[in-house]
Amino acid sequence: MSSCTSATSTPGASSQAAPPAVSDVFVLDFDGVVVDSEPEITASAFEAAAIRWPELFAPEALGAERRTALREAMRTVRPVLVKGYESMVMLRLLLRDPNCEVKLRSILSAWSAELPRALAEWGESEEELSKLFEAVRNEWMNGRTESWMALQVPYEGVTEALRGCPFPTYIASSKAAHRVAALSTSVLGLELAADSPRLFASLLPPEEKKAEALSTIGSRPLCSAPGTRLHFVDDRLDTLRAVAAVPELAARWKLYLADWGYNTAEERAAAAREPGVRVLGLSEFNELLRFGLVMGVDDGCEPTAEEVEAGV
């Protein structure tokens, strides 16, 4: 982000110049860590579903009360969504269940099986639904920009923490580069070009591609100085597990699960037991960005008796 650009190389500088000494380098997921994009994903899903299945989702076919219930259910199932178009499928599945409860549980517990089964039953294809969903989002983003941006909400304190961050910071996201760049500028007020070397975008599948991104970032001179601490913050436990499964990455990167992001209570409990993964709260994250440490996270201090008793 703009607050960290002082740590990048200067154009025209000698290729032999030593990289600036830094103590910490951060790689951050975007959705679910920096910005809450769920309201936009769900709103776009409603628009796209109304085009694809008007008999089910046109305004006259769906009452306000039912629409509200579906919006609430969509927020609950957001942790298992990987690609944007999947939100359309989730909406249609949830519509079958008057209270959203049974289908909600099946989506959370077995989405990898529910998704292909629904597509086959309806005679739909991932390619066609994805094309429609992305067209709806692009039209909204480019044609009704203010209302689209308003649906993307930075998490509390994150904008200020990023602006005050003295360390090099990268973004590694499954989101398209042009969207991350636009949101960084318009919502966070931080300049980040779509072709910035600090932005790794469209990382799908996230487990594989984010591990590759960390490997690339970790090989840069900025990250190679002895003693430099490398931090990766994501809200998907599966992604962190994939990184931890690569020995050379596990040895170098400190991994954090963002407990304010798109994950479930079960995933947070599992992360707390996962070797090499630390569950991080939002206030801790903001402090980590500013200072490279938080109380109880790599602060180099022995815990007090009170901290031990509190389980910090």
Image: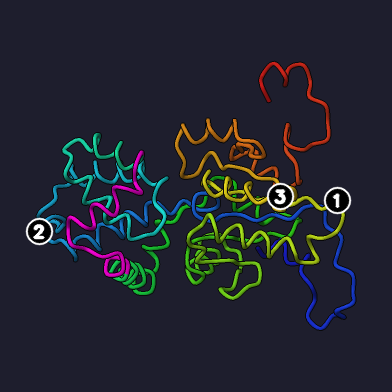
Q: Which residue is mark 3?
A: 253
Determine the main secondary structure of the stretch shown in magenta: helix
In the rendered structure, does residue 121 fall within the stretch colored magenta?
yes
Residue 139 lies left or right of residue 191; in this view the side is left
What distance separates the C-alpha of mark 1 from that of mark 3? 12 Å
Q: Amino acid at mark 1?
A: Gly
Among numbered discs 2 and 3, the one appearing first in the sequence: 2
Residue 208 lies left or right of residue 75; in this view the side is right
Q: Name the residue: 82% across, 60% down.
A: 224
Percent across and percent down for residue 210 are 58, 58
What distance separates the C-alpha of mark 2 from that of mark 3? 50 Å
Q: Which residue is mark 1?
A: 227
In this rendering, the answer to whether 311 lies above or below 67 is above
Q: Which mark is residue 55?
A: 2
Q: Amino acid at mark 2?
A: Glu
- Find the magenta span and give its range: 109-130
